[in-house]
Image (cartoon, rainbow, N blue to C red):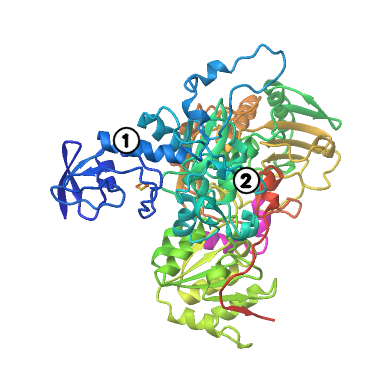
């Protein structure tokens, strides 16, 4: 039911049950807030949003006051302004204020000059949130000109021992947003208020590090912090970014939408896409370190007799054309990473068919699926999006860890539990769903397949599967959610269980664009011998290359520092990262997601498809003159999608790990990922099986 109320002299319509703040915002009327945060219930603790309401003697908070018919509200009277300034004066008694009342604070850039002929840091970098701080903005808007009370610097130690972000509670205003986001949106309680009275501060329980407290490093607390108290290490002193570009995280098959933050032509951070509460640690903190890593391949290199010499694209394309023109189809193979874009896959496939006369194109990830690629492909074809969990009455997690990678699944599992769904999980080790599952089946490592087969056939020879079988038999809408390891190792057993239970299925491959590669027909090549000429796109070098091999390495990074010494002849071709080119991925549910360049590629690097086109053109092949990805997409749209298939690749292809990106583990490029450890077990009925 709607009501009419007047705010600042303007009649507006609102829904009964809305707060004055919500109604004002919906009508473009700004009211300052600090403790309010999207998705969280009103807290009413900061009192920044006070207003005057006709007929009421006090100044209620707009975020906790429901609208009423005929209500007359004023948000910016002299009384409100004076009270708000008083509140801010009290806040500033404990909050550093150098950035607020400096006469030069609008002209920092001009003040940062120096005559010294050496690299020095100039300007007063007092706070990482300068020009991005909600408190700073509120104070500027309020017209406050100075502090009123003697400042008390809390002199708290800046906590720097967690891998991805620093905590400076000297800058905290105790709005509680970080605590409430962790608790209400993520259903975890890593943060809490510690101590009492003037000593109150935000901390983890018992003063543990985030790592010790079991934090999954989703970064939601940083996003919620209105000041500089929580700040990611990699962009702490960059200042306000130049902008954001909508993109897609390529680090796993969920393809979460992200916003790439850039400054001075470089990507400096990644934030969750609009409407997403959080990302996993890889997506939230991994991107800037990966794309700005010193090991990025920037130059075109010609490797001759084991020595790498700087070359250029003309020379490299000419040399590649010379080698490939004299190469028989069975003397050549192209191996491509499943993290490349769909456009790269399309052009790579076309290259092998049209330029190399149907030479094989392999997917390096297929080597992880050697145990049953066909069954994995069938499961992928059935895979639904995560939203399928919302209507399930039983969720069965199969080998899903969700501690750090694919951790965006955890809040969905917790939400399902809150609404009454049962949770069953099978995993040999400590894992997140095991903390709150109704039943945790814990088989011995590598006997999981046997247990899944027993469940599919309703067998309980050891008398340990009773509770799980009961849940499965009671469920009317079961959904299986399959983690990367079981999808690669145990697809036949999972398929049997899915059919027996008549369950929906959510498959979560580790690779960013496995679905896109299968649709492009990559991964279905028959196994062949190790050829003389190898073209590796984001794939690792096979072991024991014959001495007369010629290797074209097209990658974003130099995988091994000594790489030129591992082969005698070849080329190293620098490839743009996903953040430096336009492209698209297909997520685990088959949905195409497009991304755009947020920065220029470093040095000579080019988009993957463009490098292939240059070589094809040097060979005089027509049909490789695309101007941009839209030209490729237009051609792709006219072709029938291939039937997803993963055939066993030859033994000589190096199998990537679950957390590999373009041929190497992601923690090779992202320092903090190596510090992550499994967290301790909590509740859950655990059923160990001998
Ligand atoms: Fe209303 Fe904080 S925003 S009291």
Compared to residue 401, the image places residue 364 above or below, namely above
Mark linked to residue 119:
none
Whether residue 663 is visible, yes or no, is no
Rendered location of residue 385, percent (x, y): 45, 57
Q: Is residue 275 visible?
A: yes
Q: In what quadrant of the picture does the N terminus appear?
A: bottom left
Q: Looking at the magenta stretch, what is its main secondary structure?
A: helix
SS label for mark 2 = loop
The residue nearer to you, when weighing 97 against 187, is 97
The quarter of the picture where the C terminus appears is bottom right
Residue at 39% from the left image edge and 53% from the top image edge: 40
Residue 481 point in image, percent of width and height: 52, 65
Q: Does residue 401 belong to the magenta stretch? A: no
Q: Which secondary structure, mark 1?
A: helix
Q: Is residue 57 left or right of residue 683?
A: left
Q: Residues within 10 Å of mark 1 (few under 14, many from 20)?
A: some
How far is the residue under mark 1 from the one under mark 2? 40 Å
* Residue labelled with disc 2: 164
Please identify the residue farthest to the left as the structure is shown: 70
For label 2, being within 8 Å of ligand 1 is answered: no
Which residue is rendered at x = 69% and y = 28% of the image? 298
Query: How far across and down, in percent of the image, does residue 478 sit?
Result: 45, 72
Residue toward you, 338 or 659: 659
User: Which label number is shown at residue 82?
Assistant: 1
Q: Nearer the viewer, mark 1 or mark 2?
A: 1
Q: Earlier in the sequence, mark 1 or mark 2?
A: 1
Q: Determine the residue positioned at 68% across, 35% down.
A: 293
Magenta segment: 364-380
Q: Is residue 449 above or below residue 20?
A: below
């Amino acid at each position: 039911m709607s009501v009419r109320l007047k705010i600042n002299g303007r009649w507006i319509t609102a829904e009964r049950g809305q707060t004055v703040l919500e109604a004002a915002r919906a009508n473009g009327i700004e009211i300052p807030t600090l403790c309010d945060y999207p998705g969280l219930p009103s807290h009413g603790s900061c009192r920044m949003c006070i207003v005057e309401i006709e007929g009421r003697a006090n100044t209620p908070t707009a975020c906790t006051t429901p609208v009423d018919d005929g209500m007359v509200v004023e948000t910016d009277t002299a009384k409100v302004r004076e009270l708000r300034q008083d509140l801010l004066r009290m806040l500033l008694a404990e909050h550093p204020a150098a950035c607020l009342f400096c006469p030069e604070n609008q002209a920092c850039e001009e003040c940062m000059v120096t005559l010294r002929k050496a690299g020095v840091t100039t300007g007063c970098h007092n706070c990482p949130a300068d020009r991005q701080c909600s408190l700073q903005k509120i104070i500027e808007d309020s017209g406050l000109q100075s502090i009123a009370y003697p400042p008390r610097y809390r002199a708290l130690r800046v906590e720097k021992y967690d891998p991805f972000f620093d905590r400076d509670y000297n800058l905290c205003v105790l709005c509680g947003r970080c605590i409430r986001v962790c608790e209400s949106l993520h259903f975890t309680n890593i943060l809490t208020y510690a101590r009492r009275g003037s000593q109150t501060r935000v901390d983890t329980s018992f003063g543990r590090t985030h790592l010790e407290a079991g934090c999954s490093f989703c970064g939601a607390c940083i996003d919620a912090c209105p000041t500089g108290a929580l700040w990611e290490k990699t962009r702490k002193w960059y200042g306000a970014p130049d902008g954001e570009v909508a993109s897609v995280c390529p680090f796993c098959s969920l393809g979460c939408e992200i916003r790439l933050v850039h400054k001075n032509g470089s990507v400096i951070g990644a934030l969750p896409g609009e409407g997403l509460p959080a990302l996993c640690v890889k997506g939230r903190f991994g991107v800037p370190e990966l794309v700005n890593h010193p090991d990025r391949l920037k130059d075109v290199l010609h490797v001759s007799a084991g020595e790498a010499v700087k070359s250029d694209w003309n020379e490299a394309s000419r040399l590649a054309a010379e080698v490939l023109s004299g190469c028989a189809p069975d003397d050549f193979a192209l191996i491509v990473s499943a993290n490349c874009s769909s456009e790269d896959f399309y052009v790579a496939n076309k290259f092998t068919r049209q330029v190399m006369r149907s030479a094989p194109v392999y997917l390096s990830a297929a080597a992880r699926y050697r145990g049953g690629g066909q069954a994995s492909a069938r499961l992928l074809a059935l895979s639904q999006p995560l939203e399928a969990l919302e209507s399930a009455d039983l969720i069965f997690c199969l080998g899903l860890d969700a501690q750090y990678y694919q951790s965006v699944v955890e809040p969905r599992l917790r939400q399902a539990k809150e609404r009454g769904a049962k949770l069953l999980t099978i995993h040999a080790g400590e894992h997140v769903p095991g903390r709150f599952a109704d039943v945790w089946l814990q088989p011995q490592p590598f006997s999981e397949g046997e247990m899944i087969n027993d469940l599919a056939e309703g067998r309980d020879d050891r008398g340990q599967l009773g509770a799980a079988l009961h849940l499965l038999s009671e469920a009317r809408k079961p959904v299986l959610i399959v983690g990367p390891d079981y999808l690669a190792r145990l697809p036949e057993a999972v398929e049997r269980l899915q059919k027996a239970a008549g369950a929906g299925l959510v498959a979560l491959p580790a690779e960013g664009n496995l679905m896109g590669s299968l649709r492009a027909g990559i991964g279905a090549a028959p196994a062949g011998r190790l050829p003389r000429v190898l073209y590796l796109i984001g794939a690792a070098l096979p072991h024991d290359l014959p001495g007369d091999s010629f290797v074209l390495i097209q990658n974003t990074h130099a995988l091994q520092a000594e790489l030129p010494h591992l082969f005698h002849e070849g080329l190293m071709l620098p490839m743009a990262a996903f953040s430096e080119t336009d492209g698209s991925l297909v997520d685990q549910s088959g949905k195409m997601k497009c991304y755009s360049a947020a920065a220029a590629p470093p040095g000579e690097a080019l988009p993957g498809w463009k490098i292939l086109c240059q070589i094809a053109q040097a060979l005089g092949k027509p049909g490789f003159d695309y101007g941009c990805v839209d030209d490729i997409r237009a051609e792709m749209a006219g072709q029938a999608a291939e039937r997803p298939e993963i055939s066993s690749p030859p033994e000589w292809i190096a199998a990537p790990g679950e957390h590999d990106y373009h041929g190497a583990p992601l923690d090779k490029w992202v320092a903090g990922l190596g510090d992550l450890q499994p967290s301790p077990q909590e509740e859950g009925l655990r059923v160990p099986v001998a």
